Structure formats: C-alpha cells, structure tokens
Image (cartoon, helix red, strand yellow):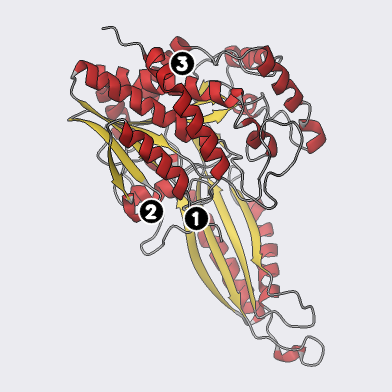
Amino acid sequence: MNFDVKKHLNEQKKQLIDLNDKIWEYAETRFEEYKSAKILKSYLADNGFAIEDNTADIETAFVASYGKGRPVIAILAEYDALSGLSQKGGITEREALVDDGNGHGCGHNIFGSASAGAAVVVKKWLESTGREGTIQLIGCPGEEGGSGKTFMAKKGVFSNLDSALAWHPTSVNMVISVSTLANYQVYFRFKGIASHAATSPHLGRSALDAVELMNVGVNYLREHIIPEARVHYAVTNTGGNSPNVVQSNATVLYLIRAPKMHQVEDIYRRICKIAQGAAMMTETEVEIIFDKGCSNYLPNRELGKVLYNNMVKAGAPEFDQNDMDFAQAIRETFSKSGGGSEELLTTFVDSKEFLKLAKEIQKKPLCCAVLPYVALNTTMPASTDVGDVSCNVPTAQFGMSCCAIGTPIHSWQMVSQGVTSLAHKGMLKAAEVLAITGIDLIQHPEVVKRAREEFEEVNASGYVCPIPDGVEPLPVK
Ligand SMILES: [Zn+2]
C-alpha cells in the first residue's frame, strides 16, 4: 500500500500551524475554550468528520468521528491555557502580551493541533483503503485544574473505545510509561461571626483562625502519611482586608495527591477530621465542597510498545541551527528566572541505557533522539486527567520535543516557545507518530486485542469515577 503519512501531513502543514498559533493567541482557560474548540471543530468538519457537540454536557467538549465499525481508535486533544501566564511569543525575556492575561504554559495549543492533524490523516487513509474502522478526535477541555476528562469519563465518553492515544509537548522524545498521582481537590469553607476586633473580640468567631489552625493541623499530619503523597493548599478567601474585623468567612482549597485513589481517600478522610477539629476549636462551621478529582494513569504496555516503534520510525523533530540557537538563548534564562534544567527523567528511570542517553541529549539545547522505552512501575509526582481515560480504555501517550531541554512547564519560557518553529516542528512530528500509530492499530486487530487483555488484567476492579454526583465542571473563578 502506498499511503505516505508524511506527504499527507505536509498538505495539512499550513493549516495546522495556523490552528496552533490561533489557539495560542486565544489562550482560553478551563471550560471557556469556545474559540479554540470552534476552530478545531471547523477544521475537522471541513475534512469530513461528523461532529458531536456539547459532549458530556460540557460546552467546549466535542467528539469528531469518521469511519464505520471497529476498532474505534480515539486521539485525545487538549486546548486550554493557564491564567496569569500571558507572554509574548518567540522572545527570550519575560514580557506579558496582555497584562494579567492567560498563556499556553503547558503547550496545549500544540497538543490540540497535532492531534487534529493526525486524525485527518488517519481519515484520509481509511478513505483511500476503504477499510473498516473508526477514528475519533475527542476534544477534551479543562485539563488544567479542571479534570475535564474525569467529568467526561463519568458520562461514559471513553467506555466504548478500543484504544486511546495521547501525547504532550515536552523537551524530550519518549513514551510516557510511568503512572501519575490520583487526586482530589476540595474547598473547606469556614463560617464564623464578625465582630469588632478590639471592642468586642469576645463576640466574634474567626473563620480565618479556623483556616490557619486547619493548615497547622495538616502540616503535622504530613509526617504520618505515605512519602509519595503530596498535599498542597491555597487560601482562596482570607475574609477581607480589615484587621479590625473578626473574619467571618474564610476558605482554603486543598489538593490531595497519592499514587492510588484509595490512598487519596484515606488522607482526605483525615484532613476532613482536621477541618472539623479546627471548626470545633474556633466555634465556627465548616462546609466541605468537592471541586474535582482524577485517577492515576495506567500506561498500557502493549500500546506503549507500538508507540515507541513508531516514534523510532518517525524519528525526532528535525531542528536546524536557528532552532538550536533560539533554544540555547531560552536555556540561558532558566537560572536567572528561577526555572531550571529539570532532570525529572533521571530521578525515576533506573535504566543504564536510558540514563546514558538522557545525559548525552542534554548536551544540546534540543532533543534530537528518541529515548529508549522503559516500562516501569513507578509514579511521576504529577497528575493528569488522562488517568481517567486510561481506566476506561487501553491508553498510551508520549512526549514530543517542542521546546528547549529543561524548559519547566507552566513557565513563560514554555509560552514563548509555543508559537515558534520549535513548536511547529514538534507538533508535526507528534501528528506523524499519532497518525502512523492510528493506522497501525486499525491494521493490526491482534495488537488491539492484546492491549485490551492487558487492560482487563490491570484494571480488574473496574472504574469508579472520583467525582461525586452533582459536582459540575467550573471555569477559573
Ligand atoms: Zn499539560
């Protein structure tokens, strides 16, 4: 068969770069990605996909499908930005594009565009061969602090698929073969009694005292939880700016993470007790409001191997000297800005071959190799709602180099690089890997079957959505 993925992608190149740059510019945050979702849907509809809107009752979620019958292969797309990270593109210093604006600090503009391009190429292949099989592009909003996919999983969006593929812009090329942390995000809202802090403090009951005591209690709890767990908090309401008022309202938002959901639940239960203790000490009341949660990621080894082979086949993005020079200039900003060459890789991978190459590639500012595939039973200290997809369907994902090695995600440097040729080249290469893999899976039902068998074994206890009934996905407040 003479289907040239690269040639077909080249035909899409101009449009994909345009999509990438527009989504970067829109920089819409969780569950408000209206313009970004719209241009992705238009691109897919123009290329013959049927569009389901308002998936799982989320306005900016969608499913674009083409083909008939099985297997049903899904490619995930993200397109949400982060607040406070507005940054001019293609420069090597911190300068906001819009004051207090948003920015694509996690490169989801690149993520969404590559995934859409890959789906179109798989569709062209299906069309040219007349083979049975369905390709879906699932538009997943609100990854950043929103767990959009978990809300979608609750409504069964991923439960009837055969395989799901995802990727993420990173600074190295590798299959993501480790698990991530499950989490709960919960508000603790304290209510007390306002009073004059000097004249009648005895009549007041301070909600802010309760928040402070709760945080002290949780900080003592840290010694007695598993070391892999992470507990963070942000005081989202201090009760106002007047020290001469006893604060009657105060809220703290907790993010509780651990490798397994039952561990998160255990820590959450103990934190709720501390909150109640703080309320009792201060004679205030506490309301516990569940915000969102997500499951840990279960990497499918069988699909991971297929992805790896296709990454090797496609090779690393072809960066030129200009790209190297720009990446080097970006790299030089890391120490000054408090960022840094994050060698997270080397902290959890215990393979000689891997470590040697990881060390070697860091000598250049851009990654020009594909790191070996190492299937590990370790957990990366981060969370993703792709976890909930992986609990519903065999899932694999990879990282593709779109920025200087060591670029911290959620940084201005990541935003700046997101509209340069670094991002464009990484995006096209990621689309190539996704497209070849999608085609590969449709051609090899035995691989899809083996991936399913592995999934059934790993996920024997089934999926329980961590988000309770009645909780709605919410935009950034
Ligand atoms: Zn991300």
- N-term-proximal mark, 1 vs 2: 2
- Say above or below: 115 vs 242: above
Q: Which quadrant does the C terminus fall into? A: bottom right
Secondary structure at numbered mark 2: loop
**Can you say whether 122 is above or below 335 in the image?**
above
Relative to 426, does residue 271 appear above or below in the rendering? below
**Judging from the image, what secondary structure is the residue with disc 3 in?**
helix
Q: Residue at x 72, y 18 (%)?
A: 325
- The answer for how far apart the CA atoms under marks 1 and 2 are is 34 Å
**Quick one: 444 or 271, which is closer to the camera?**
444
Disc assigned to residue 311: 3
Q: Residue 444: in sight, yes or no?
A: no
Does the residue at mark 1 contact the one at mark 2 (Cβ under 8 Å)?
no
> Which residue does the numbered mark 2 point to in the structure image?
59
Q: Nearer the viewer, mark 1 or mark 2?
A: 2
Residue under pointer 1: 266
Residue 381: x and y, percent? 58, 39
Name the image quarter holding the N terminus. Answer: top left
Amino acid type assigned to the residue bearing label 3 in the image: Met
The picture places residue 269, in percent across and down from the top left corner, at: 51, 61
Q: Residue at x 63, y 17 (%)?
A: 358
Spot the residue most to the top: 2
Measured as percent of width and height from the top left, residue 392 is found at 32, 40
Q: Amino acid at mark 1?
A: Asp
Which structural element holds mark 1?
helix
Horizontal side of 216 relative to 51 (left or right) equals right
Disc 3 and disc 2 in contact, CB within 8 angstroms: no
Q: Earlier in the sequence, mark 1 or mark 3?
A: 1
Question: Which is nearer the N-term, disc 3 or disc 2?
Answer: 2
Q: Residues within 10 Å of mark 2 (few under 14, many from 20)?
A: some
Circle 3 Cα neighbour tier, 10 Å, few/some/many (<14 / 14–19 / ≥20): many
